[in-house]
Amino acid sequence: MFRMYARAGRTFGGNFPLFAIFSAIPVALDLFIEFANVRSSSGAIGANLFLYALITLYSHRLLLSGKSIPFSAMFGRKQNSPLEGPQKPFMLRLVAFWLFSAVVWALFCWAVYQIAGGEGRDVLYVVMIIALVPAAPVVYVALALFGTVFPAAAALQDAAMSNALARGKKTFWRTLFRLIAGNGLFTLAALAGATFLFFAVGGGINFALETFLSFLSGLVGLFGIHLTATALCMAYEEARELSEAEVFS
């Protein structure tokens, strides 16, 4: 797990300008919607999802390549850049997994709502939050079994689900531990940091500070995505090493 943190931190820090730009874009978009007095934010939600999908792809490719992207390289297209290459194979699989996760979460939301009962928007918000607790392990198990399809698709290798399942079985328990314990500890640390900032700032939040905190929370969220990508890339590499060892044994 500590190897996962070290690798994720090294790659994230080495490509910080890229992640900072991706964190600033949603903040700028929200500011534009607020000042332009746009009533519907559905376009902003779609743009944010596309950004998260793109940074997920870029995280996998940066981790697999071990390279860092210079700031100047982000404004041009170079054939030797690890960010280049077809995006469709990865995006199709990511969208399918997002839909699967949404269905799992919705089913647990329905189950919790049947138990809790009640009406009103506040009750629905509480139900949605509580449903995350049982939904997360199910999603993590699916990732541990099939998640190596994402590094394979990012690297433009064989991304068949049957091959992903074969790889996932080889590294299932260690990957599941990294996903649950690694991401869990990071989530707790992020919540502790947010709580500390809340009490430290108190009621003195102005516009500039609120904007900065939004940018900071975006960075934290992107690192969480990057951390998950790190666990899956490590599983992909370890499964391939085990397969090669079996061939030569």
Image (tube, rainbow, N blue to C red):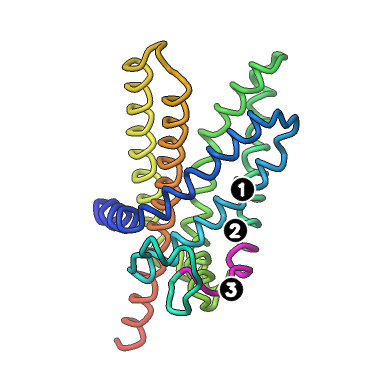
**Of the residues shown, which amino acid type is indicated by label 2?**
Leu
- Type of residue at label 1? Leu
Q: Which residue is mark 1?
A: 49
Q: Quadrant of the C terminus?
A: bottom left
Determine contact: label 2, label 1, CB under 8 Å. no
Between disc 3 and disc 2, the foreground one is 3
Q: Is residue 174 magenta?
A: no
Range covered by the magenta-colored residues: 83-92
Question: Residue at (71%, 14%) from the top-left corner?
Answer: 120
**Label 3 packing within 10 angstroms: few (<14), some (14-19), many (20+):** few
Identify the residue at image location x=65%, y=57%: 96
Q: Calculate the distance from the C-alpha at mark 2 to the C-alpha at mark 1.
A: 11 Å
For the point 53% across and 37% down, the residue is 27
Q: Is residue 169 visible?
A: no
The mark found on residue 94 in the picture is 2
Local secondary structure at mark 3: loop
Q: Of marks 2 and 1, which one's residue comes earlier in the chain?
A: 1
Residue at image mark 3:
86
The single residue placed furthest to the top in the displayed view is 203
